[in-house]
Amino acid sequence: MSKTKKYWTGLDQLHNTPEFQESAGNEFAPGVAGTDLTGKNLLESENLDEGSTKRRDFLKFLGFSVGAATLAACEAPVNKAIPYLNKPEEITPGVPNYYASTFFDGTDYASILVKTREGRPIKVVGNKKSKLTGGALNARVNSSVLGLYDSARSTGPMKGGEATDWATVDKEVGAALAKLGEDGGSIVILTETIISPSTKKAIAEFAVKYGAGVKHVTYDALSASGSLEANLLCFGVKALPVYDFAAADVVVSFGADFIAGFPNGAANAVGYGKMRDPKSGMSRHFQFESNMSLAGSNADVRVALKPSESTAAIISLYNKVAAATGGNTLSGGTSEYDATIAKAAKELVAAKGKGIVVSNSNDAGVQTVVNAINNLLGNYGTTLNMANPLYIKGGVDAEMNQLVADMKDGKVGALLIHGVNPSYSYAKAADFNAGLAKVGLTVSFADRLDETAGAGVTYLAPDNHYLESWNDSEPQAGSYSLTQPTIQPLFDTRQFQESLLKWTGNDSDYFSYIKANWAGIHTSSPDAGLLFSNFFNTALFNGVFESGTVGVTPAFVGDVAAAAGAIKKVPAGEFELELYVKAGMGDGSQANNPWLQELPDPISRVTWDNYITMSPKQMQELGFSRLERGDFMANVAELTVNGSAIKVPVYPSPGQKYGTVGLAVGYGRTAAGKCGNEVGVNAFALSSGSFAVGAVIVSNTGAEHEIAQTQSHHTLMGRDSILKETTLEEYKHNPKSGNPDLMLYVSSAGNSAGHGDSHGGGHGEEGHAEAAHEEHASPFLPASEVNLWDDHAINSGHRWGMSIDLNKCIGCGACVTGCGSENNVPVVGKEEVRRGRDMHWLRIDRYYSSDMDEERAEAEGVGAIDKFTLMEAAAEAPQVAYQPVMCQHCNHAPCETVCPVAATTHSDEGLNMMTYNRCIGTRYCANNCPYKVRRFNWFQYHNGSKDFSKNPANDDLGRMVLNPDVVVRDRGVMEKCSFCVQGIQAAKLAAKKAGRKVANEEVQSACAEACPTNAIVFGDLNDKESWVAANAKDERSYHLLEEVGVQPNVLYMTKVRNVEENEA
Amino acid sequence: MVNDKIIHRSSFRTLASLVLTSVIFFSSFGASAQDGEKLFKQNCAACHVATDKTVVGPGLKGISERAPSEQWIIDWVKNPDALIASGDAYANKIKDFSPAAMTAFGFMSDEEIIAIIAYVNSYAPPVADVPVVDAGAVDAGAASETSDEGILLNVLVGIAGLLLVLIFVLSGVRRSLTQLVSEKEGKKAPEELGVLASIVHWLNTHRGWAGVILLVGTLAFLQWGTKELMNIGVSQGYKPTQPIAFSHKIHAGQNGINCVYCHTSAEKGKTAGIPSLNVCMNCHSYVDKGPTGTAEIAKIYAALDYNPSTREYGDAPTPVEWVRVHNLPDLSYFNHSQHVVVGKIECQQCHGAVEEMGVAEQFSPLTMGWCVDCHRTTSVQVANNEYYEDLHERTPAWHDGNPVTVERIGGLECAKCHY
């Protein structure tokens, strides 16, 4: 039948016209193809010779250019070497210097060491001498060094947006201030929280000079106003407690992301990490929250609740604790979550004096109730330190609101703005801007023309970067630290304090001023017997100075009942919004830092964006794309808060409370610079003094938004050799629980039939120890003994290795930025991340648990395909685990065997070496890597490539941050984690020169150094005294994907959850 | 018994050394002008010269005429402060000559000071003695070497040319003779072939030889080509002209200054370091004249904006842009201190006899092959270094009695130098 059927493309073919016969012989239709660059048709024979490029010419040019290039390349360039005229004594070219200093930006406080090379700061690491922080720092602090080389910084003072000079600014501002001072006009200094005693003194002296009209208003973008007011009422101290998580057996947090977004988060993480060791002690952590926060993802018991339900839950906890400890109960304390709350209360009471209750609420009433709970439990003086409290938050919202009202009423004569950006971060920025227009004299000390400085501020008197500045701080009562400059100011900028001193009529520089001020600290300190210069220089060298003054824990005098009655209700609604702070971006002051923009969010793994987080179940109901198609396109929602609407993409977040949405602040900057502008939306505009916003309307616009995420599979999908976990109960019973020896089926000989039965269902090749030891002639062998390769001599010499305790890893991302900073890892931008070409040598995989597992599938009769589909979907209330993955430095590395040019080889010290200058870019190694940790340079990311202008190595200023000991990789070259081989070599050399062994402390990879919880430990596995060798012997240690038999030098340690049987 | 012997021996040593010391001690009493020069250089030369030139202190020429008496000089040298305090008129007159006060040399004997005065008075600038080895001379030496080679080459080319001419002449003779013979024999003259055609003809008729020639030619070309290609980027012998004609021969050779006196960071960091100009000024603040005159040293002063007559520094210094001689590519990490301090390698092993170089030049090829060759043969000093001893103990493979070379501790691995 079909043979008789005729197909034709057109009537001409059907009729087989002569024109058709002729044209059928030509490959191309005339005029369709085969034109040269000038548009001439090459197929028409008379044009063939007239084409602008003839084949022979082309070959000639090709030959010539290849020859010319070769010849040109033979000419060695003449390099110049320019020594110092007068070399500073402390600088030896090629040898880094470290200076102790302090980072404080109103949000994060950290005592740090700044690594400089040839007088150029290149890296920030923690200062272990600090008692307050324990050397911890987060991603924002170790990325802050890049802010120094930000090309968006102002290069000098400005007036009305035009460049001017300091003399003009001093003269005009000085005259205006003098006039206001004489007239008794209002002069307001608006700053971030000031923890510097010398700055406070300078402000006080300024106030004395310009009369009673001078007022200092403190404003915090991330406000802790509620806590401060509560503490003032309860203890008479306007400060925050210092939490000691290392002493806390039970932690109950209501929405507080105390290890990330919270004040002093990194330091809290140190203590928290210490209590995540099943051998020495495991804390029990309850978290009640609506968004999945970093703390919540690490909690043992996590309860999702709406922001509007939080107050009732806290009062319920108070009542239960009060009932058990004999306090007065409050009315109205019942909650839907009472079962869990009762359990938390019971455990808190059992661990009296060893618990912490913490809340993120910005309501003084809520915080008073939380204080009361801690007080009833006797936690003050043990886990909460109010005797020497924390000063790093000082802004009271009412003062700022009053200032804006005054400004709008024209009552403010002069406004000096330092360290804050209210036109961006203040909830009612429009009101602030309107008020700004009515202020006579406006001066901003911002380092760039930011939103506030650009909103009609007359004078911009740019402050130095903190790495160019002198300063002192008292973050905690009696605990001091110093900031010292590590480079001369790059631009014509002047420190805020020096400007203030100048306008006060004090011509001394700020350094002398600090020294003079420290004379007072010196005389009242236990070191008063020392010469002042000795005292000061020691403090400067150490970076910190502890006065040793121990305060008295103030008595709790709060009126709980009154406070509870005054709690403002969070309005309930179909949707409730809670704003949150991302572990990477913080308050957005470092939004122009590309390292932070490209740092994947720990939970969502999304870069370069903020978005609404929503429960996947609700997304499905509302018709939002759950990003399961693989094109990474999110739907855009319209979010309406109090009548004003913004459009923002929606991203699924398992664990998000149904009926709530979360949105991160810190994005949507408009005047941050090339990396921070127009990234995401500004969520500060939605806050109403509180981050728990309450009733909002969310509707699907159907529009799409590109999302750049770095992890597309969210669960382990039934695999059990990647991430291992157990419960504390089981661990106590059997330390190897959750981590049985993996046995591989190696032979069909013997009595394998019996095993085949017990390991059916596609798992015939894997078995477990219990089963394998039953019989003598077992065909199963431990995975470590199954080998395709010849062994390296792994037990001799050095063998560098790493252990990663999954129980301690909180997922904060400090290691990722620490690694990037040490190893010159390029920033590739959102588009390339979307293509899966992020260059991070170290990624932190985040896994959710799934509701589906093998047993359930069998019990419910779910088919294999459905089973795996369900396994891929995260549970609605999932457990979360983080797993940092970098090159595993396999002893039997599959990448090495496939490299055709031996560019990746194995060293005697256990390193898998990557030799960039040998690599020809076949990418075989990346394809053969079971861990997918190799990164390919698809483009030239540095040296002025205009597509990658966000990469720091692309302009002369940004390039100054590069580590000169690590090569900047070129296009077409593979790269990966080197175990910071430059650091290993440096440590070995120091040991050889001194004729001693390599010490544990001196050989640390950048990630291990940056890790606040000590989850990552690096060292020599063959050195019996090394920390990593001790961890390697632990029962919890295992290798990732052990069954592939590549024998990595990286060990993971089983995650142990402190959960009861029914909670798991 | 044994102890007795030892005591005996050591007392003998003490005795011997006592005798020796006293001999030296007594002999020093006879200090002469010869010792005066030595004493002057040891004690005075940091601030004074024997001419009338002012350095830190005044030039000492004519000191005997200027000073009130020889005893005054002796008192002044031994304790200038006391002399000033005693109200001595001349001492008070000269005490403010320089901001740096005269150092007291209380340990000197009268005889020694007299010997110094004698040396100063008899001092004559050593005109003929100046070591005239400067940049120019070395360059000239190199040039003459080159011209020697040139002559040899010219001679060879000349001989080759002569031989060629001879071949042409002889073959012409042979051809005309053949023609004559064939004419005589009445045969038809063979077809006249051109030079090229005859070569082609010969090659065609002697295929075997042609093959051999082709093979030899190709091999020679390949060998030459490979050698040339392997030398791309190798700057062995690189000897650029420097902005200041600094001579290592004078400094390290004739004056015996230790390499690390200037290249301080060779023992500390990865670079040996080009000394900063303040290191030059340690000596050149008073040595303002070299063998070739003052011009080169004046460049240091110009760079520092230093005025030698007022001894003051200006505020417009300009750094010296030296031409870098040793250029290692950025992709390789090399650390001087590793080799100098740990490996205890002499500078000369890689840099050649720098102390004989008028102009610094690259002695070694600095290729990876050169590095690797050395790493293959050099043994590591395991003993007396706890780091290596510990590593040695942990590495059974090294216990085979063979020397532990750098190669065996991983010195050929990529990531030892490339990261």
Image: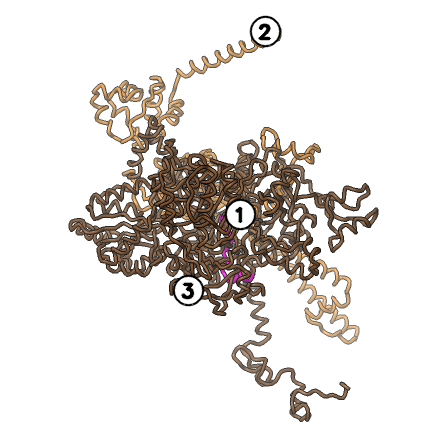
Chain colours: A brown, B orange
The percent coordinates of residue A57 (x first, y second) are 57, 74
* Chain at tag 2: B
| First to last magenta residue range | A817-835
Q: CA distance from mark 3 to mark 2?
A: 105 Å
Q: Nearer the viewer, mark 3 or mark 2?
A: 3
Q: CA distance from mark 2 to mark 1?
A: 93 Å
**Residue kind at label 3, given as amino acid type:** Thr
First in residue order: circle 3 vs circle 1: 1
Label 2 neighbourhood size at 10 Å, few (<14), some (14-19), many (20+)? few
Label 1 neighbourhood size at 10 Å, few (<14), some (14-19), many (20+)? few
Which residue, as the protein is rendered here, is positioned at the far right?
A750
Q: Nearer the viewer, mark 3 or mark 1?
A: 1
Measured along the vertical axis of the image, is residue B71 above or below residue A200? above
Q: How many numbered marks, from 0 up?
A: 3
Front one among A1029 and A707: A707
* Chain at tag 3: A
Pointer 2 residue? B4
Q: Which secondary structure type mostly characterizes the magenta part of the structure?
A: helix
Q: Which mark is residue A339?
A: 1
Front one among A1052 and B197: A1052
Q: Which mark is residue A640?
A: 3
- Judge left or right: residue A1043 versus residue A629: right
- Judge left or right: residue A661 versus residue A801: left
